[in-house]
Amino acid sequence: MICMKSGRPFGKFTVWFMLAFTLLQIKSAAQNPSETANPNASPDARAVIKYLRSLPFKEDKKLISGQFESWGRAVLPLSSPSNNLAIIHEKTGKWVGLVGVEYHESAGLFPDAPNQLCAEYWRKGGLVQIYLIMRNPASPGSFNGGGKCDIDSVLNLNHEYHRFFFHELDEVAAGLEELQKRGVVVFLNPFAEASGDWFWWGGQKPEKFKALYCATFDYLVRTKHLNNLLFVFEPSSSHPNGALYYPGSQYVDMIGISIFVPWDHEPGPADVPAYQSLIKLGKPLAFSQWGPRRGQDQAGRDEPPADNMKLLRAVQNHFPMITWWMNWNMAYAISSPTNSNYNDKKLLEQPRVINLDDLDWKSERGK
């Protein structure tokens, strides 16, 4: 295979040399004595993060599949034929390795159904990610965390925005505590797409965002003593300055990248300009939100079905440090009952891909 870069060909040997150099970079950067951001993280949380750190160095079984189910009360149990993971299993015979849910729905917080599915999937042997779309303290009725809000006011102990935000965070903590009692390790994504400007916390001065992220971490970990959490820092893929929003290694366990592309577009380096700078931060990387085509909410209509295999091609050719991915739901899902993205079964059968039955994080216990 001959690849092209700046008009000059370079061969397979050079490609592998570059990958080996990248692996050495991240192995060196990842020398974190505590392994987890929370030094009191549970043994299972520590085992999971060690497992994620090991994946880029494996020959195969190095990329965990994931599917987002839904938001709040709309989250369905696996017994429902309309559950997104059940649809994938029906069409492919595979259970993905990772389930995603969101506690919030519209302008409210509804953790019961998400917790039920998370606990069910954990018992089944899968991993769990929870997204938070915290309501805007300056405009609680804003749709999906939209609008603007002064972060300084949120962090001001005497301000009403502070009281609103931390009251809601208390509710979040109560939901997460229920999962802790059940032994569930949670990939927690508290502030999605931090470098974008469509959420109230996003697109602000990096130092303000970092202060908000750190305050949230401290409250959940040090005040609420939640030791089952692995924290995800997630910039948007299109922003070259994503690493500027990084809160620090003592607050982050893994780095997620949110990336959605048109149905006929193959993701490449130009789609994730911050990739190299994010690698240097030394944390496991993921495509924590992935869409292989534009859906109605982005393009006004669902684009034609996309090839699921382009995710694997992108990871193999351009983003080899990615350890897991999470397809969004609706038009972005791996499988759908109608008008589905195609090559779903082929994707989940690839040697690189880790589905539920392939997960081996428990082998890291006690190491």
Image (cartoon, helix red, strand yellow):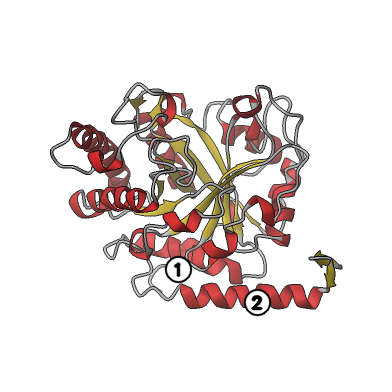
Q: Secondary structure at mark 1?
A: helix
Camera-side residue of 363 and 318: 318
**Number of residues whose C-alpha sits closer than 10 Å to that of mark 1, classed few (under 14), some (14–19) or many (20 or more):** some
Look at mark 1 in the image and give the residue it sits on: 364
Image location (x, y in percent) of residue 173: 26, 41
Q: Amino acid at mark 1?
A: Glu
* Residue 331 lies in quadrant: top right
Look at mark 2 in the image and give the residue it sits on: 20
Camera-side residue of 212 and 204: 204
Which quadrant, please, contains the N terminus? bottom right
The answer to whether any part of residue 214 appears in the image is yes
Q: Residue at position x 60%, y 72% from top?
A: 57
What label sits on residue 35 in the rendered view?
none
Dot 1 or dot 2: first in sequence order is 2
- Left or right: where 223 falls relative to 247: left
Image location (x, y in percent) of residue 132: 39, 38
Q: Residue at position x 63%, y 32% from top?
A: 87
**Number of residues whose C-alpha sits closer than 10 Å to that of mark 2, classed few (under 14), some (14–19) or many (20 or more):** few
Which quadrant, please, contains the C terminus? bottom left
Q: Residue at position x 74%, y 54% from top?
A: 313
Q: Residue furthest left?
A: 158
